[in-house]
Amino acid sequence: MKTVLLLLTVAVLNLTGQDNDLAWYGFAWYAGARQMCDQFLKGSGSPMEIHWRSFATSNTFEKVVAFYAKAKVKDMKKEPDSVTFHLDPDTVLSVHAASPAQYPTCENKPKSGEKTVILVSRATRR
């Protein structure tokens, strides 16, 4: 019985890890981040589809940017109100201050005390 429980626990942990990797498209998962949005955009008359997800954290903008800068992502672009990291031309992670909302949003918003929003996206050409 203990062996079955152990195997079940390992299987669940593996599935959870796979889901985190899918949610973050190859970027490191930011511990403690809460998912807010999960959206698909399809361009009219365009073969491109963009899947994006946003996450909120109580950590500061600077702390989140430092975490991803340490990951040695090759392409990092600093803007006045955000920092964007590219794994490749179609896979992007951007870090934003939670307020004001100068990033794509959905019905879910950052909660009180959540200071930073992380947006991950991947474009797919069909």
Image (cartoon, helix red, strand yellow):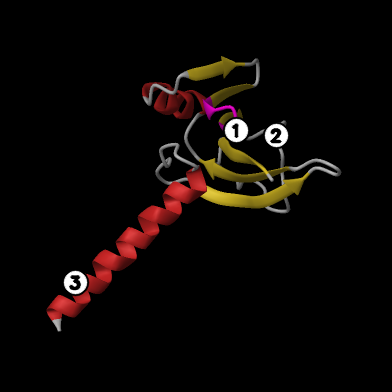
Distance between the Cα atoms at labels 3 and 1?
39 Å
Q: Residue at x 63, y 44 (%)?
A: 52
- In the displayed structure, 90 sits above or below 14; it is above
The question of residue 75 being in magenta is answered with: no
Instruction: Name the residue tied to disc 1.
Output: 90
- Mark carried by residue 6: 3
Amino acid, disc 2: Tyr
The residue that mark 2 highlights is 103
User: Magenta: predominant secondary structure element?
Assistant: strand
For image coordinates 43% across by 21% down, the residue present is 69
Q: Residue at x 57, y 16 (%)?
A: 77
Q: How many other residues sit within 10 Å of disc 1, few (<14), some (14-19) or many (≥20)?
A: few
Q: In the image, residue 12 lies at what x, y percent?
A: 33, 66
3D distance between C-alphas at marks 2 and 3 = 42 Å
Judge by depth and name the residue closer to the eye, 122 or 119.
122
Which residue appears farthest toward the front when viewing the image?
Answer: 126
Q: Earlier in the sequence, mark 2 or mark 3?
A: 3
- Identify which amino acid the numbered label 3 is placed on: Leu
